[in-house]
Image: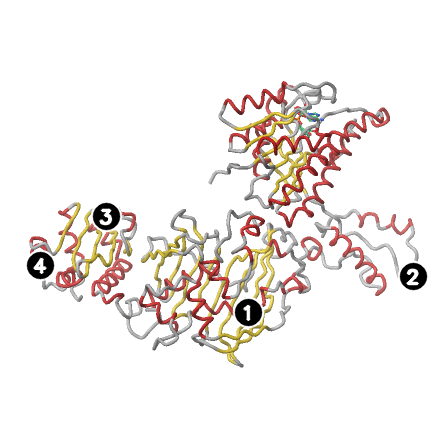
């Protein structure tokens, strides 16, 4: 989906030319209302003119965009933000871009050269951002860009004033990223390279022309979009290339011994080690930096590892707050969970069961002769340990809980769950994996009833931004995902969630406000509260249980899913299923958008003694169900051959007492053929309508299809000639 800024109000400073102009045009083109600020000064900060900003505003308006001009200096920060409020009623995004140059060699730099540069770049960005801050905080959304420069990062001859101010902006941005985090205010810094009037004095004309500002603007737009979770980053951007920068610190060297002074000679003698980047670390916070320095005190005291740096292990702990060596094997305090049939029923309602479906009653009514607990209820007792943030209290897991996502889930049952009782769960950190962009914590949870092991859960918890600690990229402890076979699904079930699905599901114990509180959801970058991943998981699991296990919980063995995209309450879930032996592969999509919500997923079933792939009882008592089940099996066995012979898509509408009760699509045209429940894609070449009884008569050879057609018992729409081919398939199944 393309990134738009509809409803967002953007203030770009220094937008009368160069990079700022490009940002303003790009934001406006994607729906934002833009305040085009420019003092209209010359490159050294002298003069003033409204023409520059006006031209950009005219250009935006000529394309049908929304913009107003503002001619104040960034030193009047409040006025710039007021212009946004006056014109558009809010301020969402601030791009601090205005800039001037006063290049001089260091000794010739005057007070004025120093002060002017600092006033425009550093103080100007401070004043504009401070004026916008409370508005962003109150609306729990804000995106801020600071503009640094390679001169600040690396130093540049003749730019002492400019370099100092530019790197000052990075320090400002780092702190704003921390202070803004809980209000969904993100702040990032760019060091751009583009041809403009500022660079035309230092770059050859060809390069000025080639390095277009439009190659930089898309990065600024992405960093300012609500979907972008980056904050506190520093990026070099130019020519369409973007690179991220971070701090790297050598392992270093302790030059002190217990009860001895540090001497300059000791420092000199260890200097090579101090500057050796082998086994370097990449600290990301003051806490990490301080922690590792404080650890030196105890090391010196104990006389340990004096040749090493503050941390004895190479990379682990100091990069991301994660230290696998310390974390793996740690246990959370055991939790107990008591439940009665009330919790089982509430859970079943939470995952969409309804009294509208007669076969759901066995999970909704404690008086039902087969009353049972849905197998996926097994995640509920085990998640209590996760809920109170216990994970972050473990050694080696210094993580930010606002950055935690539920990545994958595995559940295995060792016996059907009871409908009441007290169970105990014990959680252990099985492994920690470094995915670069984040860390994956595998948490294994065993749930016992007394001494008996009832079920096992593996939570894969993804911590955004906590990667890069030099850990392994995969774990043999992770329960694997499995992609579905490369053929159309055997069965597709569509089920709608209600607008209150998340409100209902959370009553089973997942109280995360992300699923109910719009303000909290906005902080996470969502338009509205999202459905729990484990709720979609519950939907998908019961779809499999219904279609392939006759709703019998004792047939359920295990389930694994990966949570890919969020589902909004009220959307419909489309579960596609492929049966392969005792495994049913699943892919769950949001029907309205086609987005995949669960992937790589499967349910493992216990086989029954007699033909497991046939429904133990035909749904709604339709004889035709069993026939289609058998046709589906045949297609799976020898679909390729049938496709060659038949090359057509057949639709079937089955009626009972004059009402349409089931639809099927037999696709013998594409791939190796498939059977779908429902009018799949509506692309049948020919569609048959018959009552369940007449269909059975035809299939069993008791009623001749031609006769059925002429007597009106079998209706045919579409390519009637194809009816003869259908007879081939049905005849092939004479044993029906
Ligand atoms: P530019 O000179 O084309 O644009 C800067 C704009 O800021 C001008 O339109 C100017 O009138 C305006 N401005 C100056 N003082 C102002 C004030 N007090 N209040 C409001 N507006 C004011 O330059 P360019 O290249 O587009 O630079 C944009 C930003 O990017 C600057 O902060 C610059 O330091 C930075 N930068 C640019 C690089 C490049 O390669 N172009 C390299 C590194 C940093």
Which of the colour schemes (rainbow, by chain, secondary structure, one colour) is used?
A: secondary structure
Q: Which one is in front, 4 or 398?
A: 4
Q: Which one is in front, 730 or 28?
A: 28
Element at label 4: loop
* Gap in angstroms between the C-alphas marked 4 and 3: 23 Å
Q: Is the C-beta of the residue carrying label 4 under 8 Å from the nearest atom of ligand 1?
A: no
Q: Where ligand 1 lies, by quadrant? A: top right
Q: Which mark is residue 445?
A: 1
**Tag 1 and tag 4, C-beta contact below 8 Å:** no
**Tag 1 and tag 3, C-beta contact below 8 Å:** no
Q: Which mark is residue 684?
A: 3
Within 10 Å of the Cα at label 2, are there few (<14), some (14-19), or many (20+) other Cα atoms? few
Q: Is residue 267 visible?
A: yes
Residue 311, horizontal then vertical, whole percent: 76, 58
Residue 82, horizontal then vertical, whole percent: 65, 32
Element at label 1: strand
Foreground label between 2 and 1: 1
Name which of mark 2 and mark 4 comes first in the sequence: 2
Name which of mark 4 and mark 3 comes first in the sequence: 3
Residue 715, horizontal then vertical, whole percent: 14, 52
Foreground label between 2 and 4: 4
The residue identified by callout 4 is: 704
Residue 518, horizontal then vertical, whole percent: 54, 51
The residue identified by callout 2 is: 259
Q: In the visual, does 232 lie left or right of 312?
A: left
């Amino acid at each position: 989906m393309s990134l738009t800024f509809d409803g967002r109000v953007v203030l770009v400073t220094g937008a009368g030319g160069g990079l700022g102009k490009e940002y303003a045009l790009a934001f406006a083109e994607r729906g934002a209302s833009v305040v085009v600020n420019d003092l209209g000064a010359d490159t050294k900060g002298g003069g003033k003119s409204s023409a520059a900003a006006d031209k950009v505003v005219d250009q935006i308006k000529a394309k049908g965009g929304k913009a107003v001009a503002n001619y104040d200096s960034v030193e009047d920060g409040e006025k710039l933000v007021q212009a946004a409020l006056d014109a558009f009623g809010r301020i969402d995004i601030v791009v601090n871009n205005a800039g001037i140059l006063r290049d001089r060699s260091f000794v010739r730099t005057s007070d004025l050269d120093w002060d002017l540069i600092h006033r425009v770049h550093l103080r100007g960005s401070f004043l504009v951002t401070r004026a916008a801050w409370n508005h962003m905080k109150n609306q729990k959304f804000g995106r801020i860009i600071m503009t640094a420069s390679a001169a600040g990062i690396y130093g540049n001859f003749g730019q002492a004033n400019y370099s100092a101010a530019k790197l000052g902006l990075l320090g400002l941005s780092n702190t704003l990223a921390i202070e803004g985090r809980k209000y969904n205010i993100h702040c990032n810094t760019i060091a751009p390279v583009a041809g403009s009037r500022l660079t035309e004095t230092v770059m050859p004309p060809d390069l000025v022309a080639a390095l277009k500002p439009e190659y930089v603007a898309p990065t600024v737009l992405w960093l300012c979009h609500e979907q972008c979770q980056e904050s506190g980053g520093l990026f070099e951007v130019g020519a369409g290339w973007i690179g991220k920068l971070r701090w790297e610190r050598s392992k270093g060297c302790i030059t002190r011994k217990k009860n001895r002074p540090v001497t300059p000679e000791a420092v000199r003698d260890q200097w090579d080690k101090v500057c050796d980047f082998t086994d370097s670390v990449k600290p990301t916070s003051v806490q990490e930096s301080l922690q590792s320095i404080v650890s030196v005190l105890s090391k010196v005291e104990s006389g340990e590892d004096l040749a090493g740096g503050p941390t004895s292990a190479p990379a682990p702990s100091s990069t991301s707050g994660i230290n696998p060596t310390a974390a793996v094997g740690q246990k959370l305090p055991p939790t107990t969970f008591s439940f009665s049939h009330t919790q089982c029923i509430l859970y079943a309602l939470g995952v969409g069961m309804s009294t509208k479906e007669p076969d759901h009653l066995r999970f909704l009514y404690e008086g039902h002769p087969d009353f049972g607990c849905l197998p996926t209820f097994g995640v509920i007792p085990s998640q209590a340990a996760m809920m109170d943030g216990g994970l972050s209290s473990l050694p080696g897991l210094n993580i930010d809980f606002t950055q935690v996502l539920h990545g994958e889930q595995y559940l295995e049952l060792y016996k059907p769950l009871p409908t009441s009782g007290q169970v105990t769960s014990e959680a252990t950190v099985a492994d920690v994996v470094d995915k670069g962009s984040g860390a994956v914590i595998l948490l294994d949870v065993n749930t016992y009833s007394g001494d008996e092991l009832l079920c096992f859960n593996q939570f894969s918890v993804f911590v955004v931004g906590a990667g890069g600690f030099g850990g392994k990229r995969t774990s043999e402890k992770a329960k694997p995902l499995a992609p579905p076979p490369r053929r159309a699904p055997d069965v597709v079930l569509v089920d709608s969630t209600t607008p209150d699905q998340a409100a209902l599901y959370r009553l089973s114990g997942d109280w995360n406000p992300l699923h109910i509180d719009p303000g909290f959801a906005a902080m996470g970058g969502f338009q509205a509260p999202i459905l729990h991943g484990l709720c979609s998981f519950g939907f998908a699991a019961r779809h499999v249980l219904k279609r392939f296990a006759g709703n019998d919980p004792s047939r359920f063995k295990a389930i694994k899913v990966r949570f890919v995209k969020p589902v909004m309450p009220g959307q419909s879930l489309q579960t596609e299923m492929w049966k392969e032996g005792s495994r049913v592969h699943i892919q769950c999509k949001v029907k309205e958008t086609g987005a995949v919500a669960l992937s790589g997923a499967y349910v493992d079933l216990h086989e029954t003694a007699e033909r497991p792939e046939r429904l133990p009882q035909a749904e709604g008592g339709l004889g035709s169900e069993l026939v289609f089940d058998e046709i589906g099996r045949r297609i799976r066995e020898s679909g390729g051959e049938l496709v060659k012979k038949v090359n057509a898509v057949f639709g079937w509408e089955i009626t009972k007492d004059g009402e349409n009760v089931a639809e099927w699509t037999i696709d013998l045209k594409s791939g190796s053929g498939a059977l779908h429940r429902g009018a799949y894609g509506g692309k049948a070449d020919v569609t048959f309508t018959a009552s369940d009884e007449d269909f059975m008569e035809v299939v069993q050879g008791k009623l001749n299809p031609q006769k059925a057609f002429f007597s009106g018992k079998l209706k045919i729409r579409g390519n009637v000639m194809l009816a003869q081919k259908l007879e081939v398939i049905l005849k092939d199944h004479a044993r029906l």
